[in-house]
Amino acid sequence: MAAPLAKIGIISIGDMGSGIAKLLVANGFSVATNVKGRSNDTIERAKSAQVELLKSDEDLAQSCSVILSVVPPRDAVATAQRIVDAVTGPLRRSEDSPLYFADLNAVAPSSVKSIAALFASSRAGASVRFVDGSILGGPPSPKADSAAAGEWYLPSIPTSGPHSLSDIPGYGPKLFATLNMRHISPEIGAASGLKMCFASFSKGFTSLAIQSFTTAHRLGVLHNLKDELQTVMPHHYKLAEKGVVGMAPKAYRWVAEMEEIARTLSEEGGFAPDSFIGAAKVYKTVADDTVLGQEKIGKRKRGTTVEDVAAAMAEGIQTKRKKND
């Protein structure tokens, strides 16, 4: 067996991180993660993706040449700070072999600039190359119906900033191509901004659909609404159905993402943040006030149809109202 091209660190091994890990392993890279304090589900996911299990961020930063940060938006800053601490502690990274840190999280341009500043303003600045990035689409996965072996569905991963993973000598161009990356700008914030604008369409639309379907259910006209949408706007209905049925296990992550979109549209676009602060509240209701918040990817029980999402939302909202009365 050929030696791995390079060891790539991933924080953390959720649904997206696991998909990226499997893609990298299939293309000749090895992958590692820090599992200290992680759940049994995460550890099992990492093992199934052939990910090496390490016990500290210091081990990860020393043994990997690239670290990909793929965490919920609320954890992006803390994750970056962990790596800053890891490379500026007793086990310092050599400036001759810099670590590439790619922040692929769904955060506003101002947020990712603050994250980049954590590295630049510390002793990590000389030994770390920061890359702003984002992920557009679902996790990588092999194409089951592909005629050719080895073909994968790949999300798009735009990156920006003064550094690119393709700059890494030797394996860099292969890693860049394997991850389906495109370097779109020399400015930190461009890739994250693109993600915010993209997600305002996709997840923003889903938040509207949740509200519409739930309200129609409470009015007793959900079947009528579905009929009208399928007749007049069939494409919109398919998108709404897919988004609403798939969102439950991820709703907790999307609360902060909607807040980051609100920040982006306000800071960069000049718009009031109200609409996406509202969207954040919709996903917080899903996550905190309904049974849908207990759903896990691959272990779905509730919310697998538009009707059941609407029913679960209505139940949760009604229960909360009764408690508050």
Image (cartoon, rainbow, N blue to C red):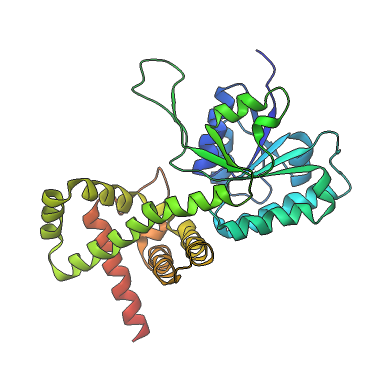
- Taking the image as shown, residue 54 lies to the left or right of residue 141, namely right
User: Percent position (x, y) of residue 287?
Assistant: 42, 63
Residue 4 appears in which quarter of the rendering?
A: top right
Q: Residue at x 57, y 22 (%)?
A: 27
Q: Residue at x 70, y 17 (%)?
A: 3
Q: Residue at x 39, y 68 (%)?
A: 275
User: Percent position (x, y) of residue 94?
Assistant: 86, 38
Looking at the image, can residue 60 be seen? yes
Which residue reaches farthest right?
A: 90
Looking at the image, can residue 29 be seen? no
In this rendering, is residue 27 above or below 139?
above
Q: How many marks?
A: 0
Q: Quadrant of the C terminus?
A: bottom left
User: Percent position (x, y) of residue 206?
Assistant: 33, 56
- Taking the image as shown, residue 291 lies to the left or right of residue 87, namely left
Which residue reaches farthest bottom?
A: 325
Q: Nearer the viewer, residue 49 or 275?
A: 275
Residue 214 appears in which quarter of the rendering?
A: bottom left
Q: Nearer the viewer, residue 130 or 160?
A: 160
Q: Quadrant of the N terminus?
A: top right
- Taking the image as shown, residue 136 lies to the left or right of residue 126, namely left
- Taking the image as shown, residue 40 lies to the left or right of residue 275, namely right
In this rendering, is residue 214 above or below 135?
below
In this rendering, is residue 260 above or below 17?
below
